[in-house]
Image (tube, grey):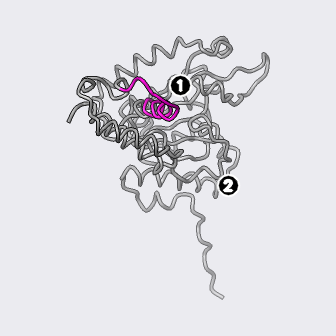
Amino acid sequence: MSSFIQGLDILLRQLRSLDAANRPRVDQAIIDRIEKLKAEDPVETSSRSPVAAYQEPSNAADVVAEQELNSAAATPADDQEVVPADDREQRMATLREKVLVCTKCSHLAEFRHTVVFGVGNPSADLMFVGEAPGADEDLRGEPFVGRAGELLTRIIETMGFKRSDVYIANVLKCRPDMPKGSSGNRQPTPEEMQTCLPYLRDQIEIIQPKVMVALGGVAMRGLFGTSEPMKSLRGRWHTFGNIPVMATFHPSYLLRNQALTEKRKVWEDMLQVLERLDLPITQRQRNFFLAKPEASTNP
């Protein structure tokens, strides 16, 4: 089988998986066009990439097909070869150097103390994604180091990991700027997150996590462009590329709302993550944040 046909087979698998992943449906004409290309199997293009081999779309439907092919080609295939750990560390270090000097958002570059790139194991099975650095993170150059970060660390440890076992990053790598003399943090804008999202995509491609956790509605908006309320997003699986993503509340939400029921919701989300990773769950873990039954009294 030529490399051209092998490439088309990979693209077909990716396109056909879109429906199963709850992503927009692919026009059947695109699938038909690729099947036709497979049948033709042009010898002169067998040494080139499947996308490069098809260069002259003849009508509007073919233009759409070409765009979908390019998009699918940029998505890692399910059978993508695992990258060695040493190579991942080198690639992450190279990416970090690039991100640390980024000035794409000039207003953020002028305001920040440092770029908050990300931290953790570049070969992690589990990756947490937040929205943007706050004041504490901006000063230390590490995500989730304030009060919300301390709570996230406790959640990670209760799951049976160390913070160094997982990878933690934000959609936006710079702290959103604030008016001079004001305190607190603001949410990143959609435009800021879209500008910075390619860096997160690169991190995800290097790490190749088995599962991701999106922390809060803003992180979900940055990853998926969704405007749905968090109450309808959390507790269920979403798909980013070919990676399952669990949406859950941001730790800062639990700091504002100490109700046992809300803590249990987040913990139930984490139990789903552990199950997806095929990790053992103790009975003690399953019982965290459950309301204790009232002691019975004899009449």
Residue nearer the viewer, 131 or 2: 2
The residue located at (51%, 25%) in the rendering is 198
Can residue 63 be found in the magenta stretch? yes
Q: Which of 204 and 112 is in front in this view?
A: 204
Residue linked to disc 2: 259
Residue in the image at 70% along x and 44% along y:
256
Q: Mark 1 points at which residue?
A: 142
Residue type at tag 1: Glu
Q: In the picture shown, does residue 87 fall above or below 212?
A: above
Residue 43 placement (x, y as % from top left): 23, 27
Q: Give the range drawn in magenta.
A: 54-70
Binning the other alpha carbons within 10 Å of mark 1 as few (below 14), some (14 to 19) or many (20 upward) gives many
Is residue 4 highlighted in magenta? no
Across and down, in percent, residue 33 comes to 40, 39
Residue 171 position, x and y percent, is 56, 30
When asked about the image quadrant of residue 86, the answer is top left
* Residue 48 sits in quarter: top left
